[in-house]
Image: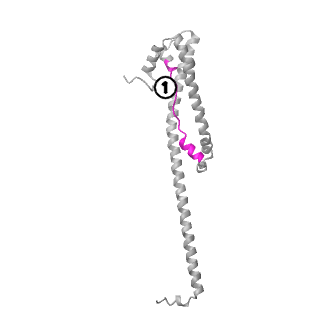
């Protein structure tokens, strides 16, 4: 076997050191590649999770807007009914009394999701959110959704335990429910008769 003329001048000990340095260098290079790949994979996972949080929040925003519109419509009807009680007569020419009463027979049960935010919080990845204000908001989100769920349960219980029995004793529930079906839920008319 022939060797390069310059390699013949290197002592065996120096040759051994060169080989050891090459091996150590290649191992360190492999570690660097592995670390880079791990960081890249972590960034991709964080971005995917943040994207799912964004998507979940956009969906929740639409649901909360629906809930807000319903609650505003129901509140407007309740105010009109209270004004009629105070004045002793109902004078709204655009909306019938049965329609106003029907608005009180709906309740909201919009399902608000916390799956992506829970994953972010449970996985300890909340630090991936750069905005301090947004981090605080996301930490509070599950508690706020739970408060809304309890409000929805309370609305349903009030409807079943108070409003419906009262209307059953003092009005025609069949006529009111027909009006509810004709006009749909207050505010957004969800559940309206398709005709």
Q: Position of residue 30 (x, y in %)?
A: 54, 68
Task: Identify which residue is drawn at 62% across, 42% down.
Answer: 139
Q: Nearer the viewer, residue 111 or 58?
A: 111
Q: Nearer the viewer, residue 34 or 87?
A: 34
The quarter of the image holding the C terminus is top left
Display coloring: one colour
Asked whether residue 103 is drawn in magenta, I would say: yes
Q: Position of residue 75 (x, y in %)?
A: 55, 22
Looking at the image, the residue that sits furthest to the front is: 1
Q: In the image, is residue 108 above or below residue 14?
A: above
Looking at the image, the residue that sits furthest to the top is: 88
Task: Identify which residue is drawn at 54% across, 15% down.
Answer: 165
What range of the chain is rendered magenta?
A: 102-122
Q: In the image, is residue 150 above or below residue 24?
A: above
Disc 1 element: loop
Task: Identify which residue is drawn at 50% across, 90% down.
Answer: 5
Q: Nearer the viewer, residue 68 or 191?
A: 191
Which quadrant of the view contains residue 35?
bottom right
**Residue named by callout 1:** 187
From where the camera sits, is residue 181 visible?
A: yes
How crowded pointer 1 is (Cα within 10 Å; few <14, some 14-19, many 20+) is rated as many
Task: Identify which residue is drawn at 57% across, 27% down.
Answer: 153
Total marks drawn? 1
From where the camera sits, is residue 96 visible?
A: no
Q: Position of residue 163 (x, y in %)?
A: 55, 17
Q: Position of residue 55 (x, y in %)?
A: 50, 43
Q: Is residue 167 left or right of residue 195?
A: right
Q: Nearer the viewer, residue 131 or 163?
A: 163
Asked whether residue 89 is drawn in magenta, I would say: no
Q: In the image, is residue 194 above or below residue 144?
A: above
């Amino acid at each position: 076997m022939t060797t390069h003329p310059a390699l013949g001048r290197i002592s065996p000990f120096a040759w051994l050191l060169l080989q050891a340095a090459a091996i150590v260098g290649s191992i360190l290079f492999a570690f660097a590649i592995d670390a880079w790949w791990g960081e890249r994979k972590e960034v991709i996972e964080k971005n995917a999770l943040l994207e799912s949080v964004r998507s979940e929040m956009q969906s929740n925003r639409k649901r909360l807007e629906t809930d807000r519109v319903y609650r505003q419509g129901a509140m407007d009807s309740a105010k009109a009914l209270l004004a009629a009680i105070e004045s002793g007569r109902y004078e709204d020419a655009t909306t019938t009394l049965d329609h106003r009463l029907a608005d009180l027979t709906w309740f909201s049960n919009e399902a608000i999701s916390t799956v992506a935010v829970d994953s972010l919080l449970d996985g300890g990845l909340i630090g991936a959110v750069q905005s301090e204000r947004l981090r605080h908001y996301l930490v509070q989100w599950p508690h706020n959704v739970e408060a809304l769920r309890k409000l929805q349960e309370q609305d349903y219980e009030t409807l079943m335990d108070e409003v419906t029995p009262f209307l059953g004793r003092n009005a025609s529930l069949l006529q009111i429910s027909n009006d509810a079906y004709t006009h749909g839920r207050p505010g957004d008319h969800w559940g309206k008769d398709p005709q």
